[in-house]
Image (cartoon, rainbow, N blue to C red):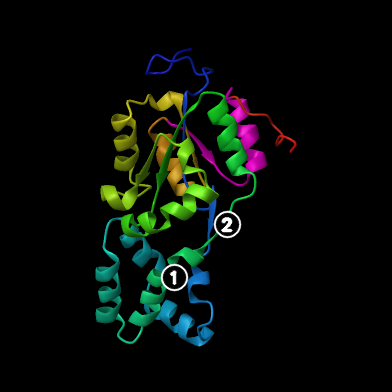
Amino acid sequence: MVDAGGTPPDTPPDTVVFDLGNVLVRWEAQRAWAGLEPARVAAFHERVDFPAWNLALDGGRSTAASVADVAASAPGHEDVAQRYVDRFLDTLAGPVPGTRAVLEELARGGVRLLALTNWSAELFERARPLLEGVVGLAAFEAVVVSGAEGLVKPDPAIFRLVLQRFDLEASRTAFVDDSRRNVDSAAALGLRAVHFTGAEALRADLAAMGLPVTTAPPRV
């Protein structure tokens, strides 16, 4: 059997596209508000739809405009929003255990590696030096940042952009993300999408596709 792109279904992918947040680096938004009175943080979340506000940042809205949005819609809470912006690096809580080793194993095996992340363009550039150490950004041919593109996952358009920009065949491209919605959107376009739940399961999923990873982490 051959798929619509002419590739036998058991052919291993030649490219793996990784999400970053909570796949390679832990993101814990609440760490930005450490030290504030819990009641103030709770009041902010009652007045502000933080996931939607943060998604707008990921979609390309500037940090200044985003804080101004809070000042207009929830006066008195803009300082809490500003604190998230100012202390964004504190939200990056270290590596997700085991995933960088998978990334490096794929790189040694000659697999093409890309990253696709929902991230504010401003905040990503601020975080880049930290990520280079924690995640190993040098392993990636490129990092596609939603805020720079004005598109966010799970919009199919951002997956099409990656396929077109890097001349990828969907059926030869594995995609790894911790969000089920993002995984489902990628799969609907024919990517070999993996819902990330941990490095051990990821190893098993990628090895089952024929990619050059062991099913157990290498001994150090």
Circle 1: residue type: Arg
Q: Secondary structure at mark 1?
A: loop
Q: Is residue 165 left or right of residue 190?
A: left
Residue beneath the point at 51% across and 43% down: 136
**Residue 29 % position (x, y):** 49, 67
Q: Are marks 2 and 1 in contact (CB under 8 Å)?
A: no
The answer to whether residue 22 is magenta is: no
How far, Cα to Cα, is label 2 from label 1? 15 Å
Circle 2: residue type: Gly
Crowd around label 2: few <14 · some 14–19 · many ≥20 (10 Å): some
Residue 94, numbered label: 2
Residue beneath the point at 46% across and 64% down: 89
Which of the two discs, 2 and 1, labels the residue nearer the N terminus?
1
Quarter holding the C terminus?
A: top right
- Vertically, is 182 above or below 92? above
Most foreground residue, 3 or 127: 127
Which region is colored magenta? Answer: 191-211
